């Protein structure tokens, strides 16, 4: 059985005070109401990681995630955060290659391969994001584009490393827009992704990989999306900023 994972990506939102309020509400409601063994990952801004970690404590199935990490190990890189720093404050998962990082901060497939290597070496789990623009989908090149993102950033890994990676398919046209991919569109892409992995690593590895969906996923559409056979949870933006809404998304993953 694949691990279901629902991660909340807070992006650049919430003061420390508001973030701790959100995290404690999520943790309290989830500890009371989430009975399935879905992993919940909270991804606050860097400044809140240590405090959110304390709130998580030893809650079962609730983990800490970072939204980004440097592709350099250490040294004179003003403003950057290293894998060692993240590890030292108890981070479990690191989002790599979110489309906002690719688009606004020019992160290339090559750079994302470096980040993935560092995260794996440090013993944390990369949540590797990929997804096409609306123009690419309209041109019919979306499947090849997403496959190339995986090939270029991840296919240098050996099988045992690749099995530790979580993938997140996030069509750019669905992120923060209120437009969700239909469950058919999402399932089609997730199956293509799994087949692509199988072509390189074999079916057993492909079947073991968690592939999340992200892009305007919320309580009202999560059940339908998560019911698809190749969708194994979600990477949630806007809906992760309200505790009740986020936990309802978590509860949709079974
Ligand atoms: P959204 O963001 O849920 O607000 O569309 C998803 C993401 O960017 O991970």
Image: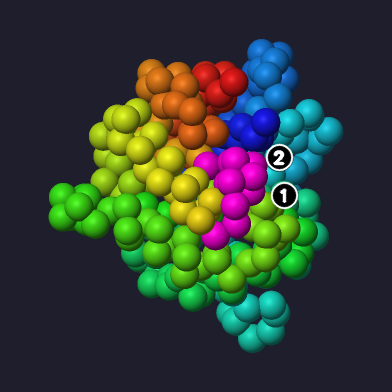
User: Decide: marks 2, 1 in contact (CB < 8 A)?
Assistant: yes
Please name the colour scheme applied to the rendered image. Answer: rainbow
Q: Estimate the spatial distance between the alpha carbons at disc 2 and disc 1, rounded to whole Å.
A: 6 Å
Q: Magenta stretch: dominant SS?
A: helix
Please provide percent x and percent y for residue 195: 47, 48
Q: Quadrant of the C terminus?
A: top right
Q: Is residue 222 above or below residue 10?
A: above
Please provide percent x and percent y for residue 146: 37, 56
Q: Is residue 129 above or below residue 243?
A: below
Q: Quadrant of residue 218?
A: top left
Give the number of the disc on residue 63. 2
The residue under the point 77% across, 59% down is 123
Give the number of the disc on residue 92. 1
Q: Quadrant of residue 42?
A: top right
Q: Secondary structure at mark 1?
A: loop
Q: Is residue 201 left or right of residue 143?
A: right
Q: Which residues are magenta?
A: 200-211
Q: Closer to the N terminus: mark 2 or mark 1?
A: 2
Number of marks present in the image shown: 2
């Amino acid at each position: 059985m694949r691990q279901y994972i629902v991660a909340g990506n807070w992006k650049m939102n919430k003061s420390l005070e508001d973030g701790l309020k959100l995290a404690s509400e999520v943790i309290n409601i989830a500890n009371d109401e989430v009975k399935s063994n879905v992993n919940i990952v909270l991804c606050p801004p860097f400044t809140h990681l240590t405090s959110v970690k304390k709130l998580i404590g030893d809650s079962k199935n609730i983990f800490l995630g970072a939204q980004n990490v440097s592709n350099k190990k250490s040294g004179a890189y003003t403003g950057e955060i290293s894998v060692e720093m993240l590890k030292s404050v108890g981070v479990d998962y690191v989002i790599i290659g979110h489309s906002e990082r690719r688009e606004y901060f020019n992160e290339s497939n090559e750079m994302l391969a470096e980040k993935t290597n560092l995260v794996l070496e440090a013993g944390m789990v990369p949540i590797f994001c990929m997804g096409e623009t609306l123009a690419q989908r309209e041109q019919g090149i979306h499947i090849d584009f997403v496959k190339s993102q995986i090939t270029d950033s991840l296919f240098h890994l050996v099988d045992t490393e690749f099995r530790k990676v979580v993938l997140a398919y996030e069509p750019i046209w669905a992120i923060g827009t209120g437009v969700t991919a239909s469950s058919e569109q999402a399932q089609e892409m997730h199956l293509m992704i799994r087949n692509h992995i199988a072509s390189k690593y074999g079916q057993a590895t492909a079947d073991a990989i968690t592939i999340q969906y992200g892009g305007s996923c919320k309580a009202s559409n999560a059940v339908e999306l998560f019911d698809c056979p190749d969708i194994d949870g979600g990477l949630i933006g806007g809906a992760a900023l309200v505790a009740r809404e986020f936990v309802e998304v978590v509860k949709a993953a079974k």
